[in-house]
Amino acid sequence: MKIQPFSPVKDRHSFHIDVQARYWVDYDSVEELCSVLRDAAGFGLPILPVGGGNNLLFVNDYPGILLHSCLKEKTVLEDKGDEVLLKAGAGHNWDELAAWCVAQGWGGMQNLSGIPGEVGATPVQNIGAYGVEAKDIIEAVEVLDRTDLSQRTIAAADCEFGYRRSRFKTDWKERYIVTYVHYRLSRKPVFQLNYGAVSARLEAQGGLKAGNDPQSVKDNLQMVRRTIMAIRDEKLPDSAKVGNAGSFFMNPEVDRQHFRQLKSACPDMPAWELPDGRYKLSAAWLIDQCGWKGRRLDEAGVWPTQPLVLVNYGQASGEDILELARSIIDDVKRRFDVALRPEVIILGE
Ligand SMILES: Cc1cc2nc3c(=O)[nH]c(=O)nc-3n(C[C@H](O)[C@H](O)[C@H](O)COP(=O)(O)OP(=O)(O)OC[C@H]3O[C@@H](n4cnc5c(N)ncnc54)[C@H](O)[C@@H]3O)c2cc1C
């Protein structure tokens, strides 16, 4: 275990805001996690479990303990016929896990390739990309209960997964720390390719191989992973070079009546009908229409190829990013009467 007081956080999160935490703690086992929580209770400091910091915006120094898991092991719990149940530690790098599963010929994570972060955040955020969400492969989540330091395994069905949402972000936020996640993967995957430019790109490369033999499945998984990584690289800034947290806003949802009004005023507005009859709108499109794409307010800006992504050009403070976000929210509200909500977790606002 490593405990660092007054620890700089700039290089531990993808927005690279220059802040510090009262304590940064790296723990190597569940026992160490329990001992930190026991000690922390005595000091009354706030606690936040963090992974790679890819979805966080620090507006101020963090006055408590940022708790980082170094549980990185992975174990096959079951290997039956076409299905594999894999358990991975919260501190395992997500994309390295996805790459490893693809190399084994196990389908399920390929569309989620290239999402930065660690395993522990995948159920919290219900990460998603290219038509797939973590909920599609999560079987269960192992947690430590902060109230009594007991360990539990929670079935996916109890996590109330939704669009970038789970109970770990709402009523369980102060209660559970994710220690391990169980993923169900398949040797006969059903490929989800009808999203964005994925299928067109694959066709241009000759398409996926026919057949479900292990080598064809491995080749197909690799091809989908490579294609998705290439599309992501073209659209998104590399956070090692330009600070950002991916999509800053969620795609907003509106009711049918509101959608009809919007569509008659803007016939080319992209939208997806949801199973409950509401409509999901493209936040990127709305922001673009308000003229924000590529704009810069001093050190904070809107990424030129993806207006959902707000960036720190180097010296932005959390407040600068927040100011920019507020201006965008106000403009979208004024022009479309649609409320944008941040996907990024804002700390210390
Ligand atoms: C360039 C870029 C592209 C991105 N693209 C996507 C994308 O396509 N799809 C997508 O869904 N996201 C995307 N994101 C957002 C981000 O990658 C995900 O939200 C990811 O899951 C964050 O993982 P992390 O380990 O960095 O979590 P952090 O940012 O450190 O934490 C995120 C949340 O999870 C909680 N948390 C972390 N670990 C634990 C734990 N062990 N127990 C309990 N709570 C925990 C934190 O408290 C926080 O609330 C992108 C981000 C960037 C920078």
Image: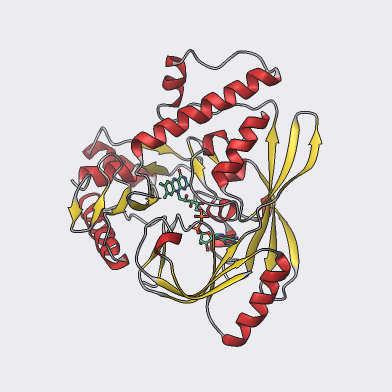
Q: Residue furthest bottom?
A: 42
Q: Is residue 100 above or below residue 252?
A: above
If the image is split into quadrants, where does the C terminus sit? Answer: bottom left
Q: Is residue 27 above or below residue 127?
A: below
Depth check: 55 or 241 in front?
241
Kindly tell me whether residue 254 is visible in this rendering.
Answer: no
Q: Is residue 165 above or below residue 59?
A: above
Depth check: 136 or 116 in front?
116
- Which residue appears at 67% of the width and 80% of the height? 38
- Which residue appears at 20% of the width and 50% of the height? 335
| Left or right, 235 with reference to 3 | left
Depth check: 139 or 54 in front?
54
- Which residue appears at 31% of the width and 40% of the height? 260
Q: Is residue 176 above or below residue 38?
A: above
If the image is split into quadrants, where does the N terminus sit? Answer: bottom right
Kindly tell me whether residue 166 is visible in this rendering.
Answer: yes
Rendered location of residue 35, percent (x, y): 69, 76
Rendered location of residue 235, percent (x, y): 34, 37
Rendered location of residue 283, percent (x, y): 33, 46
- How many numbered circles are shown? 0
| Left or right, 72 with reference to 274 | right
